[in-house]
């Protein structure tokens, strides 16, 4: 499904055989683990460049470089009832932490449906894919900058 | 079932105030066997994370849609749903949910296609209930299934179909597009980095006026604005008249059911239909007229 981080693929496999109730319970546990972007990375009002356009839960995404060239991901979810967005943010933050940009850029959108289920509504799917799009774009920007030999931000 | 309209709702000047109940009313009727509380959300994780005690969930995709074709459940499906919910035709169903009751109004609208008029919406929805510190539980109530005899679904009075909308637009009758200004203008589906949102063309139905659905509510607690404020928006800004034949639409008909609710019940318009095919049908259809100018 994806050449992305192994931890994300393993998690997707864990979700594969769950029924609707089990899937919801596990995702709620992930949502409970969500931590908002720390103030040293971003403070309100969050810049529009980090805003996920298709997400009804008003999500924001940041990628921060580690000295070894790997990344950490941070998120904000402004809708307090945006549990799916919070769960997805926590999953991405944890499974992508300290992974190289090439790996993060290679995450396939199918992983969203593997984790959240194939019966995901169009709107919800768009929002979660939108979060992944911003994550992927940030990772690709690093790759392009490195290919050009310049700084990455 | 009649209920006394709480003073805070009566004061807002709605045409049919009895369609709304307050969180306080719901709290006082948690154990009322004549009342079934139903949560309907955009986010499917919310109900299992905690809900109003005694509430059951209606999921728009799993419970209200036909499992194969793009349509709503039929009479037999509605009867099964009402049986699962433990409802009889005499049960008062009170809907609430996230997003200022956007999905609650959608479920309410589908219930009206089957004539279940004993239906209410909890003003402020889930947000207001939570902010008032009222109890939530993860316990799913056990319900004794009922026998519910429903009529055939009536698609004639509350629902509009593509060809009817085309005729409506050609006749210059009012259309309310409740999507965001970016969706209305067509800007969103054609910007780089944006998806196509399931449609091939962006823009809006010719002649439609844009009133994003959420303008009818207070964002801080999800409650509906008073009738005067609603009239200022729908009549003052975009020129609707109470006797107009109005069609509302959005992307798939969910947001527009919220505006249908506002115009029908809060302002008392007698002829409002929801075009559930909405932009995902119109923007994908060959040869239908589209406007792209930004006219608020």
Image (cartoon, helix red, strand yellow):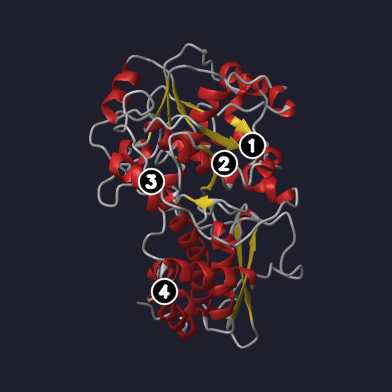
Q: Nearer the viewer, mark 2 or mark 1?
A: 1
Q: Look at the picture and state if B20 lies above or below B280.
A: above
Q: Report crowding for label 2: few under 14, some 14 to 19, many 20 or more residues within 10 A (C-alpha).
A: many
Q: Which residue shows up at 54% across the image and 57% down it?
A: B141
Alpha carbons under labels 2 and 3: distance apart: 16 Å
Q: Are marks 2 and 3 in contact (CB under 8 Å)?
A: no
What is the secondary structure assignment of the residue under circle 3? helix
Query: Left or right of B260: which side holds A113?
Result: left
Residue found at x 34% / y 43%: B79
Q: Earlier in the sequence, mark 2 or mark 1?
A: 2
- Which residue was labeled with disc 1? B123
Picture residue at 50% right of the left edge, 58% below the top? B142
The chain containing the residue under callout 3 comes to B
User: x, y percentage for residue B265?
Assistant: 54, 24
Kindly report the distance in space between the C-alpha atoms of the residues bearing marks 3 and 1.
22 Å
Q: CA distance from mark 2 to mark 1?
A: 8 Å
- For the question of whether residue B196 can be seen, the reply is no
Q: Residues within 10 Å of mark 1 (few under 14, many from 20)?
A: many
Asked if marks 2 and 1 touch (Cβ < 8 Å), the reply is yes
Return the residue at label 2.
B101
Q: Are marks 2 and 1 on the same chain?
A: yes
Circles 3 and 4 on the same chain = no
Q: Residue B217: in sight, yes or no? A: yes
Q: Is residue B288 left or right of residue B85?
A: left
Q: Position of residue A33 (x, y in %)?
A: 64, 73
Toward the viewer: B122 or A11? Answer: B122
Residue density around tag 4, few if under 14, some if 14–19, many if 20 or more, within 10 Å: some
- How far separated are the C-alphas under marks 4 and 2? 29 Å
Provide the residue designation for mark 3.
B64
Residue tagged by mark 4?
Answer: A18
């Amino acid at each position: 499904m994806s050449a992305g981080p192994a931890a994300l693929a393993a998690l997707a496999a864990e979700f594969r055989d769950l029924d609707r109730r089990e899937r919801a319970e596990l995702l709620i546990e992930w949502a409970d683990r969500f931590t908002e972007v720390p103030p040293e990375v971003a403070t309100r009002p969050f810049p529009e460049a980090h805003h996920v356009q298709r997400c009804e839960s008003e999500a924001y995404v940041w990628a921060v470089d580690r000295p070894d060239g790997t990344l950490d991901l941070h998120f904000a979810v402004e809708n307090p009832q945006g549990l799916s967005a919070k769960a997805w943010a926590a999953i991405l933050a944890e499974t992508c932490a300290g992974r190289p940009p090439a790996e993060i850029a290679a995450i396939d959108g199918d992983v969203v449906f593997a984790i959240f289920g194939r019966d995901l509504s169009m709107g919800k799917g768009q929002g979660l894919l939108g979060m992944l799009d911003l994550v992927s774009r940030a990772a690709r920007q690093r790759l392009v900058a490195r290919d050009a030999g310049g700084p990455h931000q | 079932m009649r209920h006394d309209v709480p003073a805070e709702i009566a004061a807002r000047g709605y045409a049919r105030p009895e369609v709304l109940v307050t969180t306080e009313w719901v709290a006082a009727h948690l154990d009322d066997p004549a009342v079934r509380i139903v949560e309907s959300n955009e986010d499917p994780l919310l109900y299992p994370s905690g809900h109003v005690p005694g509430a059951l969930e209606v999921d728009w995709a799993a419970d209200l849609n036909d499992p194969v074709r793009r349509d709503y459940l039929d009479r037999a499906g509605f009867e099964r749903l009402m049986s699962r919910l433990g409802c009889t035709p005499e049960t008062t169903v009170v809907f609430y949910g996230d997003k200022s009751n956007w999905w609650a109004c959608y479920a309410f609208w589908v219930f009206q296609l089957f004539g279940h008029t004993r239906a209410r919406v909890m003003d402020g929805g889930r947000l207001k209930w939570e902010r008032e510190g009222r109890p939530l539980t993860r316990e799913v109530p056990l319900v004794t299934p009922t026998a519910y005899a429903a009529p055939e679904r009536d698609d004639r009075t509350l629902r509009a179909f593509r060809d009817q909308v085309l005729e409506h637009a050609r006749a210059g009758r009012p259309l309310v597009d409740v999507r965001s200004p970016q969706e209305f203008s067509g800007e969103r589906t054609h910007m780089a980095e944006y998806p196509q949102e399931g449609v091939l063309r962006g823009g809006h139905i010719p002649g439609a006026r844009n009133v994003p659905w959420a303008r009818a509510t207070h964002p801080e607690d999800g409650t509906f604005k008073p009738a005067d404020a609603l009239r200022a928006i729908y009549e003052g800004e975009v020129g609707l008249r109470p006797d107009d034949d109005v069609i509302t639409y959005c992307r798939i008909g969910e947001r527009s059911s919220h505006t249908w609710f506002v115009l029908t019940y809060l302002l008392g318009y007698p002829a409002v239909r929801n075009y559930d095919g909405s932009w995902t049908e119109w923007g994908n259809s060959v040869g239908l007229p589209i406007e792209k100018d930004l006219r608020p």
